[in-house]
């Protein structure tokens, strides 16, 4: 019995259930991996929305690292281009496309609420706009592609460090969104499982593992530096 939808084979599961049997591990795990992969892709469409809305609500980027957001854009661009170039199934990397779009919007908002942009900032933005289409289009040497992808792990690592250090020195997380960090953390955990099931390159799995560590650190800082709500004074008669 074959019933395939979006690369997901429901046939073996339905056949086992029809015979009142528990589906075999070799049938269930690939299906679960695909389903989780598409769930990650769907959830990724709103990952950075809490952070964006928090900034817009308060009109402030207090406590946020511009460098972290900029490096994220570069990292997502390289990772997305590599996965497309390798011909991986969309369920294995689809969230990168939505995260890249949101990361670019977030950087734009941070620029808007930050002090006036200097020449250096404009140069960085123009350089990215000039190189990104070439990288995403895969119009670079394959060997260079591998080097770029290997470097994106370091990029994501160092993208989190400025924010982590800023939180540490300020003893606070400013406008950093708990929900966005939690979704990044949870997504990284699930992506390790789906990457193993999809038999993606070890470098892809390593990227998700780094995401668990760095996003987990940010999440821990938000919890650790969270200030208790002021107690309301009881009215005296």
Image (cartoon, grey):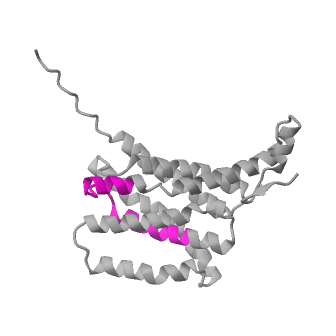
Q: Quadrant of residue 96 in the image?
A: bottom right
Question: Residue 101: x percent and y percent?
Answer: 47, 67
In the figure, is residue 30 to the left or right of 174?
right
In the figure, is residue 91 to the left or right of 224?
right
Residue drawn where x is 60% and y is 63% of the image: 94
Figure check: 201 above or below 8: below
Q: Main secondary structure of the magenta part?
A: helix
Extent of the magenta region: 51-79
Residue drawn where x is 47% and y is 47% of the image: 182
Residue drawn where x is 43% and y is 64% of the image: 103
Is 59 one of the magenta-colored residues?
A: yes
Figure check: 199 above or below 33: below
Q: Nearer the viewer, residue 237 or 68?
A: 237
* Extreme-top residue of the structure: 237
Residue drawn where x is 56% and y is 60% of the image: 95
Is 222 one of the magenta-colored residues?
A: no
Q: Is residue 72 visible?
A: no
| Number of callouts | 0
* Extreme-left residue of the structure: 237
Q: Is residue 82 visible?
A: yes
Q: Quadrant of the C terminus?
A: top left
Q: Nearer the viewer, residue 102 or 147?
A: 102
Question: Residue 102: x percent and y percent?
Answer: 44, 63
Question: Residue 232: x percent and y percent?
Answer: 20, 27
Q: Quadrant of residue 62 in the image?
A: bottom left
In the figure, is residue 20 to the left or right of 220?
right
Question: Residue 38: x percent and y percent?
Answer: 63, 55
């Amino acid at each position: 019995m074959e019933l395939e939808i979006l690369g997901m084979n429901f046939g073996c599961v339905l056949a086992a259930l029809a015979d009142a049997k528990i589906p075999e591990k070799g049938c269930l795990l690939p299906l679960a991996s695909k389903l989780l992969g598409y769930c990650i892709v769907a959830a990724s469409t709103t990952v950075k929305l809490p952070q964006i809305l928090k900034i817009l609500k308060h009109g402030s980027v207090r406590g946020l690292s511009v460098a972290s957001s900029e490096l994220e854009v570069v990292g997502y661009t390289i990772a997305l281009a590599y996965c497309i170039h390798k011909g991986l199934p969309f369920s294995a990397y689809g969230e990168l496309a939505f995260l890249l779009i949101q990361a670019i919007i977030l950087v734009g908002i941070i620029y808007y609420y930050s002090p006036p942009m200097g020449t250096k900032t404009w140069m960085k933005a123009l350089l990215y706009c000039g190189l990104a289409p070439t990288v995403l289009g895969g119009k670079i040497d394959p060997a260079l592609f591998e080097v770029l992808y290997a470097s994106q792990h370091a990029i994501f690592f160092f993208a989190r460090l400025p924010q982590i250090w800023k939180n540490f020195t300020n003893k606070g997380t400013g406008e950093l969104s708990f929900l966005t960090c939690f979704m990044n953390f949870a997504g990284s955990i699930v992506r390790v499982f789906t990457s193993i099931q999809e038999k993606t390159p070890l470098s892809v799995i390593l990227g998700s593992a780094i995401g668990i560590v760095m996003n987990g650190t940010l999440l821990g800082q938000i919890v650790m530096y969270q200030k208790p709500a002021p107690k309301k004074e009881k009215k005296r008669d």
